[in-house]
Amino acid sequence: MLDYGIDMSDVRRDIALPDLVAEGDELDALVSAQADWSTDTPAVGWTIAHQIAHLASADENVLIAIRTPAAFDAVLKYAENEGSRYRDLDAAAGAAEPRSELLERWRAGRIEVAAALGDIPLDQPFPWYGSQLTAALMVPLRLMETWAHGQDIFDAVGVAHRPTSRLRHIAALGVTGRELSFYTAELPTPAEPFRIELTGPDGESWVWGPEDAEQRVQGSARDFCLRVTQRRPLAETDLMAIGADAQKWLEIARIFL
């Protein structure tokens, strides 16, 4: 399977890649100002250091997958052996590093990942967890992860996470990955089309799906992104569903395995 079967034909790398870089730079500015990375974040057992370590490790794995695809088998084997503990163990190992070293490792990895994802042909596949990916999906995926784990850190330090137009990439992932939500929840994917109407940070309208669809989701782009990344429960968002299938989707929404 390529790109988890998600249609990424609308991705514009010339827009998404600079947005990925900008998202990382914004988070960098926040964490660089925090002298103590032992502050707990909303993710149970994860401090600021764990969050940055996870992002740094993921970037390193992207580089392995692109540069030496055969070596990615070892990453998959380690993940399989550790099972549900994999991400926690990986993050804990990075969090044990001195803050300055972890920060520099994350910074260097971000630069290399951006270069690698910019150089590789947009449709060239490379291995990933449970699928083969292309840069068309990996660029918005890295942006989504940076934003979502960044949200945990913003919440932890009590700083408002200003919404930007970069959310459109994350919202698009959430929309196109609707089937993944139902698959992961072991539910049949609704056959009816959905209409998604979101309000962007500057008041603009972002829409997907046919205008006459009976299943509809409406709300702010920020809250939609918070929901599909599972950073907020549905009750704490302004999202409104019309139709039983749309309601179920918001209840189980996710854009990661």
Image (cartoon, rainbow, N blue to C red):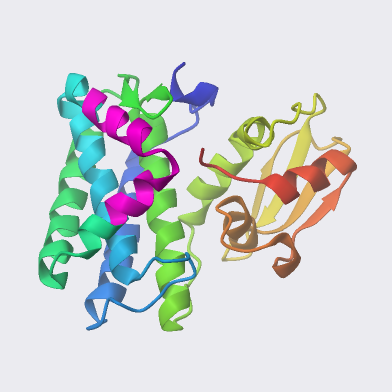
Look at 15% across and 44% down and name the residue there. 112
Where in the figure is residue 246, as x and y percent of width and height?
80, 43
* Residue 180 left/right relative to 3: right
Residue 21 visible in this rendered orientation of the protein: no
Look at 35% across and 26% down and name the residue there. 134
* Residue 52 left/right relative to 2: left
Look at 84% across and 35% down and name the residue there. 213
* Quarter where residue 212 is shown: top right
| Looking at the image, residue 97 lies above or below residue 254 | below
Where in the figure is residue 253, as x and y percent of width and height?
66, 46
Look at 31% across and 52% down and name the residue there. 89
Q: Is residue 253 inside the magenta stretch?
A: no
Query: Which of 176 and 228 lies nearest the eye of the viewer?
Result: 228
| Looking at the image, residue 36 lies above or below residue 77 | below
Which residues, given as a range, are shown in magenta? 73-91
* Quarter where residue 129 is shown: top left
* Quarter where residue 232 is shown: bottom right
Residue furthest to the top: 1
Q: Is residue 90 inside the magenta stretch?
A: yes
